Image (tube, helix red, strand yellow):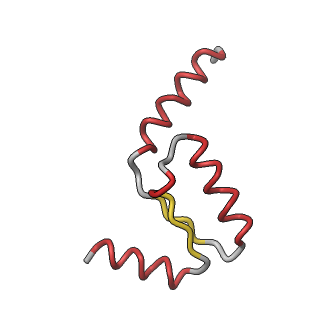
Amino acid sequence: MSTPATKVDHAKLFGKYIADKKILIADPNNSSRTGLSKILINLGANTPNVIRVGNLHDAEELILKILI
């Protein structure tokens, strides 16, 4: 059984893990993209590393730019 202190430690560990990751959110619903990005930033993601696009085509183009 987890104690509240353990949950805080897990949250801190996750925050450290996610802090330097690049995150791509692809969703046609702007509210969903915004909400998910806010959650990830609150969990520890760096704002410039959270990229939001409205469709699969734009997501694929961004991924290809990163890989090439």
Which x, y percent locates residue 55?
Answer: 59, 80
Q: Residue at (65%, 65%) from the top-left corner?
A: 33
Question: Is the residue 30 above or below the residue 6 in the image?
Answer: below
Left or right? Give the position of 19 relative to 8: left
Which x, y percent locates residue 2?
Answer: 63, 18
Question: Is the residue 1 above or below the residue 45 in the image?
Answer: above
Instruction: Place residue 63 in its image quadrant.
Output: bottom left
Q: Hey, which residue is sitting farthest left in the picture?
A: 68
Question: Is the residue 60 above or below the residue 14 in the image?
Answer: below
Q: Residue at (57%, 71%) from the top-left corner?
A: 26
Left or right? Give the position of 11 relative to 1: left
Left or right? Give the position of 51 relative to 30: left
Judging depth in this view, the residue of 26 and 49 nearest the camera is 49
- The quarter of the picture where the C terminus appears is bottom left
Q: Residue at (42%, 82%) from the top-left corner?
A: 61
- The quarter of the picture where the N terminus appears is top right
Which x, y percent locates residue 12?
Answer: 51, 29
Question: Is the residue 25 above or below the residue 6 in the image?
Answer: below
Q: Residue at (58%, 49%) from the top-left corner?
A: 40
Q: Hey, which residue is sitting farthest front in the picture?
A: 48
Judging depth in this view, the residue of 34 and 17 nearest the camera is 34
